[in-house]
Amino acid sequence: MDLGKLGEFGLIDTIKATQKVPDGFTGIGDDCAIIPRGDGLDTLVTTDLLIEDKHFILKEISPYQLGWKSAMVNLSDIAAMGGKPIASFLSVGLPKGLDSDWTDAFMKGYNNASGDCPLLGGDTTSADKLCINVGVLGECSHGKALLRSGAKVGDAIYVTGPLGDSGAGLQIILQGLERDETALKLIERHYMPKARIEEGLQLSDIQGVHSAMDISDGVASDLLHILEASGVGAKVGVLPTSPEMESCCARYGWDAQKMAASAGEDYELLFTADPEVSIPFPVYRIGSIVEGSGIEWASHASYQGFKHF
């Protein structure tokens, strides 16, 4: 079947069906794989690929920003599972024209984003376009990882921050729009996301938090993963947006709610929890888990997240 018709997640399901996952392991289907260790902890494993002209425009992003983003989008997967990052691995395919000043700046961004999570290995090669693959190991208490499959009817649905800033920043870049102070803030949100590691760790310790993931492809896509894994539906109201994003949308006639639902790459946490549970940091409630399937939007709109194929 043509991959465009199969789609990213159809392809993933096809690959998943070929694998036999060992007892006690969690394989394809969550933000990270889970490998039990037998010492009261589980190891979390994630990997992600960034390709020039698909995930970034090399002439538009600084090497420092690209290094930062390459690390952070993977650290965000560990955060989504409620884990602590413990090591990373970096492989790069480098095209002609890049020099040691470029790689030095890239690694500075990567290392600053990684913090106490050390780089332990990887691979390098030449390539026609810049290709970056990062793997991160994390750990959490045995059985405490946050999964997509635990949402329950009656749960509140939360996000940890405003949505759509990254998508608006990307549109400013792609359309060559004016880069005033507001625009530059949105572009920075696109190039330099921040993984919600501390928030994820706190959520994993709260009884009554039932499911979680990070927002990479937009709530319109990512919430569906939780719903399908949990066998439930959702009602979603107004999504939180920043003043900068609202201002930019008003200026250019963009639909702010569509941007917030569909654009992706915000890397905020999306989670469901008993509405009586107290969350110890600022969050936005965007809806509720209900019986059924799919998302019912209060605006009666039909939003669609990012598609890779």
Image (cartoon, rainbow, N blue to C red):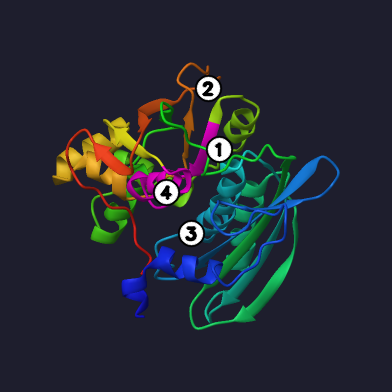
Q: Image point 40% across, 40% down: which residue?
A: 232
Q: Distance from label 1 to label 3 (Cα)?
A: 23 Å
Query: Which label lies toward us, 1 or 3?
Result: 1
* 83 in magenta: no
Image-based side of 130 in relation to 166, left or right = right
Query: Of the residues under marks 2 and 3, which one precedes in the sequence?
Result: 3
Residue to which mark 4 is pinned: 228
Q: Distance from label 3 to label 4 (Cα)?
A: 38 Å
Q: Distance from label 2 to label 3 (Cα)?
A: 32 Å
Image-based side of 97 in relation to 198, left or right = left
Mark 2 belongs to which amino acid?
A: Phe
**Disc ID at residue 196:** 1
Mark 4 belongs to which amino acid?
A: Glu
Residue to which mark 3 is pinned: 62
Mark 3 belongs to which amino acid?
A: Ser
Mark 1 belongs to which amino acid?
A: Arg
The residue stretch that appears in magenta: 210-231
Q: Is residue 21 above or below residue 111?
A: below
Query: Of the residues under marks 1 and 4, which one precedes in the sequence?
Result: 1
Residue 87: where, in percent of width, then height? 74, 53
Image-based side of 288 in relation to 143, left or right = left
Q: Is residue 5 above or below residue 189?
A: below
Query: Of the residues under marks 1 and 2, which one precedes in the sequence?
Result: 1
Q: Is residue 231 above or below residue 153?
A: below
Binning the other alpha carbons within 10 Å of mark 1 as few (below 14), some (14 to 19) or many (20 upward) gives many
